[in-house]
Image: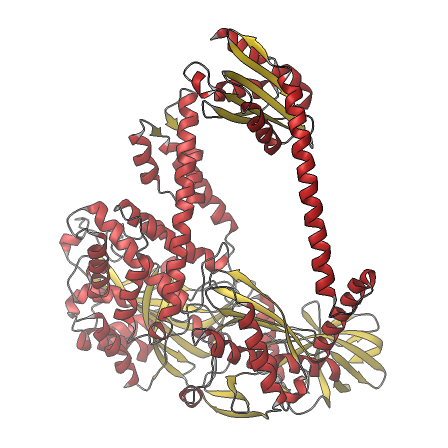
């Protein structure tokens, strides 16, 4: 059974059991900064299990793309380790529980996948008698095939939050795949028993003290690795030998000119290339971009690791973008976004390949210099620390360093290299923090919402309303009141205050009532339909139960709305000018300005920026109506409404339309018509990472202030010239022309002065052993000055050996020169090295000319004296 058939069969099976098939979520978790990647099928549904959001349906099934990198060094060397993989799963949010999850899993594995019951083994948590009863008495699995295991393997929990016992389904791959021990069982890690499905029964809530409380609404979270199941059904020894990987591996082998299955070293390289290319292709498609931190660093590391393995197969030219194209061809039907963003993804990969090639060449140069220096010191071993630096900074695998070193007669301190690698892993382990599934504050707010109920947001329609204060929080706990000068958090039954979200900052304003006045500093929405105001008491005393008037500051709300609607116009204009590959990669909307990050491969030309500004301002001048409507996500997408790929949307979505110009899914606040924006002006455009650009712009009042600041600057600039704004460019050009004329005049004088100084220097020439010898310090000269002096001197001398020195800004420079007729006897590199050593420096170069630096200006005269001894000794 092929991989795509297993995927489809799984989803259709659970659809027949009343589950809704949902597309895979992005590899970049939506609105969850605690996670770097979507690493399991349940990650997109975390808000449903924690209570932060209410699911549209109670039964869901997915095939989720996942990315994990803790065991990256094992990829390609074991049968099962991957960075990218697909997780089949079925989920229940307070609907069915253990009996259905277990019986359906057994039905699918035995009847639909056709795996023999005699090959199946089950594990359960130690005291999960309920699961044992279902497996044994309902399903009919013999008791001896059910193993009870401990908390470390069969109980799922991550800090504070929902948790529960697990039950796993194992397949016996046969004695020939095992350790041969008569005690071999599912608890053995020899590889004979392969886990294919994990069923998690979410039935408890773990608090900070470690207490477990039964949940009122229990859940099911299961995960089946597609690649693992495929290896079982296709009867192959590893996941890499399934059709899921072989098509990519065989293609990579073809373009690299090697064969799979004949050489272990080649096989490992091809497996790494196939695995890592799948990971980077999906990750870049989902919006991750190579960089030096966070997700970007992971992508860059995977891409460069794949390229290093390609280099071990003698491939120096970029090739990963070709392999990525094969991934897109193979997986594009199951994941349409791959084909939709193929051009963007492949360009990013190729750009990164070319960038790494440059870095690798720098590393080669560094290695060559290192071996030359070691040879001069009489050493033949490359230290482990330096080998590690080549690996860590320039991407050199130890194998490549060893290969190059052996060609030059060097060895590598591989033990020292391993120590540095282990030290890096230790630092990474120490830096890695465990992130609670549900933080203490999250757990507190979840309980508070269950107690208080939902908070209704009315801020789309009004900026002023009244409501009862239903809770006050200070220092993470409920209190009855706040008094003047105190800060805390206020929850009301309804609110017009917009909470920060979707790139838009929160509203500010005041909450007031009989005997109190509060300044609203910030507003957040930590849970679905639950809004909290961060406040400071300006006057009086506020208590729970008080009636309050909530007033949003209209000016800041309007300025923010202008900028938010302008981002929609800008997004559309960018697509019109640059192409449909442009997608939002981040935004910030404040009352003062807007910032918009987008995917694009190169900096914008001035004419492109001007065209984008014109398109946006034309849309503003047309005073297009801004219309809001609600529809289903599918209907919105079918209508061509722009949706952010990594954003999490519910079944019902809010569509913001600006006339017939723009339509986007958005929960932010907007103006009533585009004309209210006033004027749009781009302040700047820059790069913030490979393939991502940033535009900063202003509108309305902000644009007016910007124009006025430019006007003030121009007034200051024209003042010395006593001219108009229009005349200023001509006046400035005249000034620069005069400066250039003066520069030419000064340069001419310098050359005449230098020629005079050279004549003076020539009077200092002495003859030793028939050789013209000159040693001199040229006052205030840097290396460039020494070179110019040398050119003038050698034009007037023959059979010379000379040594020049200069000190500028405390930095010492030396230059040695030898007539080419004398280079068989004298070497400029040797001479300058001896001189620089006295001044605390070093250097070298060609036999006829060499240069060096020094640290001690007071040693220059002493250093120049080495020339006599050097010439006499030859």
- Depth check: 22 or 680 in front? 680
Residue under the image location 78 percent in, 76 percent down? 519
What percent of the width, then of the height, locates residue 383? 42, 30
Quarter occupied by residue 847: top left
Residue 476 seen in the current view = yes
- Depth check: 174 or 660 in front? 660
Report the coloring of the rendering: secondary structure
Residue under the image location 30 percent in, 36 percent down? 403
- Depth check: 805 or 510 in front? 805
Q: Is residue 857 shown left or right of residue 298? A: right
The answer to whether 752 is drawn above or below residue 432 in the figure is above
What percent of the width, then of the height, locates residue 395? 40, 45
Residue 138 seen in the current view = no
What percent of the width, then of the height, locates residue 216? 48, 80
Quarter occupied by residue 530: bottom right
The answer to whether 555 is drawn above or below residue 201 in the figure is below
Q: Quadrant of the N terminus?
A: bottom left
Q: Is residue 296 shown left or right of residue 543? A: left
What percent of the width, then of the height, locates residue 816? 54, 22
The answer to whether 294 is drawn above or below residue 769 in the figure is below
Q: Is residue 111 shown left or right of residue 351? A: left
């Amino acid at each position: 059974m092929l991989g795509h058939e297993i995927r489809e069969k799984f989803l259709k099976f659970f659809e027949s059991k009343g589950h809704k098939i949902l597309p895979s979520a992005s590899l970049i978790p939506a609105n969850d900064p605690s996670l770097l990647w979507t690493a399991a099928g349940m990650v997109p549904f975390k808000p449903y299990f924690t209570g932060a959001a209410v699911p549209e349906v109670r039964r869901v099934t997915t095939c989720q793309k996942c990315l994990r990198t803790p065991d990256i060094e094992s990829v390609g060397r074991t049968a099962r380790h991957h960075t990218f993989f697909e997780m089949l799963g079925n989920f229940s949010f307070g609907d069915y529980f253990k009996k259905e999850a277990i019986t359906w899993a057994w039905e699918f594995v035995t009847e639909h996948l056709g795996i023999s019951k005699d090959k199946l083994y089950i594990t359960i948590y130690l005291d999960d008698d309920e699961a044992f009863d279902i497996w044994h008495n309902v399903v009919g699995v013999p008791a001896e095939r059910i193993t009870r295991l401990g908390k470390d393997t069969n109980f799922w929990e991550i800090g504070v939050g929902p948790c529960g016992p697990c039950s796993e389904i194992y397949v016996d791959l046969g004695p020939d795949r095992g350790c041969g021990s008569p005690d071999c069982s599912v608890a053995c890690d020899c590889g004979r028993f392969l886990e294919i499905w994990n069923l998690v029964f979410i039935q408890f809530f773990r608090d900070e003290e470690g207490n477990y409380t039964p949940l009122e609404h229990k859940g099911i979270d299961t995960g089946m690795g597609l690649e693992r199941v495929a290896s079982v059904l296709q009867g192959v020894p590893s996941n890499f030998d399934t059709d899921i990987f072989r098509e990519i591996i065989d293609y990579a082998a073809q373009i690299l000119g090697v064969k799979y299955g004949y050489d272990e070293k080649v096989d490992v390289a091809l497996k790494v290339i196939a695995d890592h290319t799948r990971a980077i292709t999906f990750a870049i498609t989902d919006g991750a971009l190579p960089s030096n931190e966070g997700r970007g660093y992971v992508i860059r590391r995977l891409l460069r690791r794949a390229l290093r393995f390609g280099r071990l197969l003698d491939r120096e030219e970029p090739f990963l973008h070709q392999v990525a194209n094969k991934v897109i061809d193979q997986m594009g039907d199951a994941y349409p976004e791959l084909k939709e963003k193929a051009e963007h993804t492949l360009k990013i990969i190729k750009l990164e390949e070319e960038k790494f090639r440059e870095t690798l060449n720098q590393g080669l140069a560094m290695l060559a210099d290192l071996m030359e220096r070691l040879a001069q010191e009489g050493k033949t071993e490359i230290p482990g620390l330096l080998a590690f630096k080549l690996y860590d900074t320039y991407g050199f695998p130890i194998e490549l360093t060893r290969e190059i070193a052996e060609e030059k007669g060097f060895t590598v301190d591989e033990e020292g290299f391993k120590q540095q690698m282990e030290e890096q892993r230790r630092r990474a382990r120490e830096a890695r923090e465990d992130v609670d599934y549900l933080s203490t504050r999250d757990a507190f707010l979840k309980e508070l919402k269950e107690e208080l109920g939902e908070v209704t947001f009315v801020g789309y329609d009004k900026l002023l309303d009244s409501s009862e204060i239903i809770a006050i929080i200070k220092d993470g706990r409920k209190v009855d009141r706040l008094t003047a000068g105190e800060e805390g958090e206020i929850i009301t039954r309804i609110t017009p205050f917009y909470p920060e979200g979707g790139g838009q900052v929160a509203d500010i304003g005041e909450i007031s009532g009989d005997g109190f006045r509060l300044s609203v500093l910030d507003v957040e929405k930590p849970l679905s339909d639950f809004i909290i105001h961060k406040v400071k008491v300006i006057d009086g005393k506020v208590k729970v139960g008080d009636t309050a008037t909530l007033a949003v500051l209209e000016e800041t709300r309007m300025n923010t709305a202008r900028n938010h609607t302008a981002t929609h116009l800008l997004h559309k204009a960018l697509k019109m000018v640059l192409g449909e590959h442009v997608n939002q990669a981040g935004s910030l909307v404040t009352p003062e300005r807007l910032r918009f990050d987008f995917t694009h491969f190169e900096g914008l030309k001035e004419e492109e920026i001007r065209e984008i500004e014109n398109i946006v301002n034309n849309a503003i001048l047309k005073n297009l109506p801004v219309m809001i409507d609600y529809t289903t996500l599918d209907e919105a997408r079918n209508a061509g409404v722009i949706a952010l790929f990594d954003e999490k949307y519910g079944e019902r979505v809010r569509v913001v339309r600006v006339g017939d110009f723009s339509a986007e899914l958005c929960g932010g606040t907007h103006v009533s018509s585009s004309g209210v924006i006033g004027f749009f002006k781009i302040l700047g455009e820059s790069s913030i990472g490979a393939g991502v650009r940033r535009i900063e712009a202003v509108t309305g009042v902000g644009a007016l202030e910007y124009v006025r600041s430019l006007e003030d600057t121009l007034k200051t600039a024209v003042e010395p010239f006593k001219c108009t704004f229009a005349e200023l460019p001509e006046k400035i050009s005249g000034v620069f022309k005069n400066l250039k004329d003066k520069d030419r005049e000064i340069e001419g004088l310098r050359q005449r002065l230098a020629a005079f100084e050279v004549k003076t220097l020539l009077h200092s020439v002495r003859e030793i052993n028939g050789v013209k010898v000159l040693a001199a310090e040229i006052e205030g000269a840097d290396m460039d000055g020494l070179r110019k002096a040398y050119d003038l001197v050698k034009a007037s001398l023959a059979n010379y050996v000379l040594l020049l020195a200069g000190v500028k800004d405390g930095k010492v420079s030396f230059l040695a020169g030898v007539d080419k007729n004398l280079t068989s006897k004298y070497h400029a590199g040797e001479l300058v090295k001896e001189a620089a050593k006295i001044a605390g420096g070093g250097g070298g170069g060609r036999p006829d000319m060499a240069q060096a630096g020094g640290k001690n200006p007071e040693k220059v005269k002493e250093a120049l004296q080495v020339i006599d001894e050097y010439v006499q000794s030859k």
